[in-house]
Image (cartoon, rainbow, N blue to C red):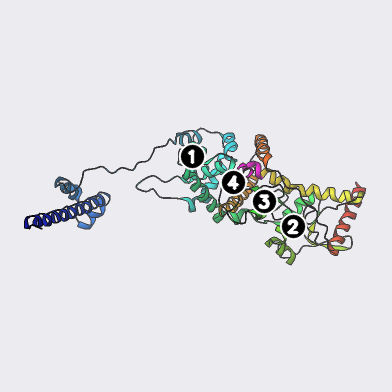
Amino acid sequence: MEPAATIAAVMAVVNTSHLIIHLFQRQMLRNRARRLRHRGEDIKSERGTDLSQSTGPCAVNIMVAMGHVDAVERRFWARKMSTDWWDRIVLQVWDESQWLGNFQMRKGTFLELCELLSPALKHKDTRMRAALTVQKRVAIALWKLATPDSYRSVANHFGVGKSTVGVAVMQVANAIVELVLSKVVTLGNIQVIIDGFATMGFQNCGGAIDGTPIPVLGPDHQASQYINRKSYVSKVLQALVDHRGHFTNIVGWPGKVHDTCVFRNSGLFRRLQEGIYFPDHKITVGDVEMPIVILGEPAYPLMPWLMKPYTGALDTEKELFNYWLSNCRMVVECAFGRFKRRWRSLLTRSDLSETNIPIVIAVCCVLHNLCESKGETFMAGWEVEANSLAADYSQPDSRAIRRAQRDALCIRESLKARFLSEQGNL
């Protein structure tokens, strides 16, 4: 290669290197300028100088003047959504019937719930945006649980992004599980429950038990375990309720599992069997002692602490026993009906993950108890809409299991005789 060509090649390499270094330094200075804009107050304190009183140019302006950085205003590109409907209509204009019809509770109950959840839901504003208030977050969650509306529809109502709705629902759900679940879904005063069922016709009763299916999306693995006898994917919610229809114990299992299997594998069964769920409170019926019992449908096992109806050919005495038992056991079926009609998202196939769906079901149980205890009116229109939504997901039929223990048979026979004698005295 000629000397002149060699020198030209070397100079080209040198010039290219200088250009790369210049661009690299320029980028570093630009990044530094951005940091200075966002840390103006911190830099003032670090230098020990009150720059608000200075008339000279700041470091960023000097670098802009020297051409090291571009004077470009930093912006966060986000579509501004209207929140007028929530801020100016719902909070300020809606009356109690509108609150009840859309959030399943009156405004006073809603505000009490917000106060309970506030310790877990208070968020601070960031530089990019203001945090959603506790009230708005709770309202979004209640609206989503109370309706079959899509995430996009709920987002448009409240002037937030679609993903914000999903985040708000689970934030509120986790807060309810953490702060409220153990206080609301609990046995409570057993004597009040016993007295309540006695008024309804059954002595020494501590609750009624049943299961109900909740439609869900099939998980990626073992999906067949969630297909129930009506051939749709679901989870089973087993619940024990008191005389008022409040949930006192809940457990969930995959939909294929029969109610009896769910019950036998639950902690409730173990504690009842060990005699530690209820206090030791026995009454004498005829010539046998009867502990506190729960009432179940024919699918459940007959136990000394679990009474179920007679099946097969029934005489007058057995029909009378079944009448009084069914009259009291209906409380759990009514509870499930009100539960699903209030929280209508449970009537359609939920798109929540396998991890989140049990949390949301438990939260709806908490909200059911809260509404019932506050005396929130159950509106007739909910039942019409609920029946329409539930048409595609019918309740599986129960299958009777005819196993029984000798002691349980004696208790049931004595109860049958008592009901007959009381009927004769009327």
Disc 2 to disc 1, C-alpha distance: 41 Å
Q: Does residue 415 appear left or right of residue 184 in this picture?
A: right
Crowding at dot 4, Cα within 10 Å, few <14 / some 14-19 / many 20+, comes out as some
Of 295 and 45, nearer the camera is 295
**Amino acid bearing label 3:** Ile
Query: Which residue bears the numbered disc 3?
Result: 227
Of 294 and 393, nearer the camera is 393
Q: Secondary structure at mark 2?
A: helix
> Residue at 58% of width from left, 44% of height from top?
145
Q: Secondary structure at mark 4?
A: loop
Q: Earlier in the sequence, mark 1 or mark 3?
A: 1
Q: Does residue 147 appear left or right of residue 122 in this picture?
A: right
Q: Secondary structure at mark 1?
A: helix
> Residue at 55% of width from left, 46% of height from top?
112
**Amino acid bearing label 2:** Thr
Q: Earlier in the sequence, mark 3 or mark 4?
A: 3
Query: Which residue bears the numbered disc 1?
Result: 155
Disc 3 to disc 4, C-alpha distance: 15 Å
Query: Which residue bears the numbered disc 2?
Result: 260
- Magenta stretch: residue 180 in it? no
Part of the protein shown in magenta? 339-349
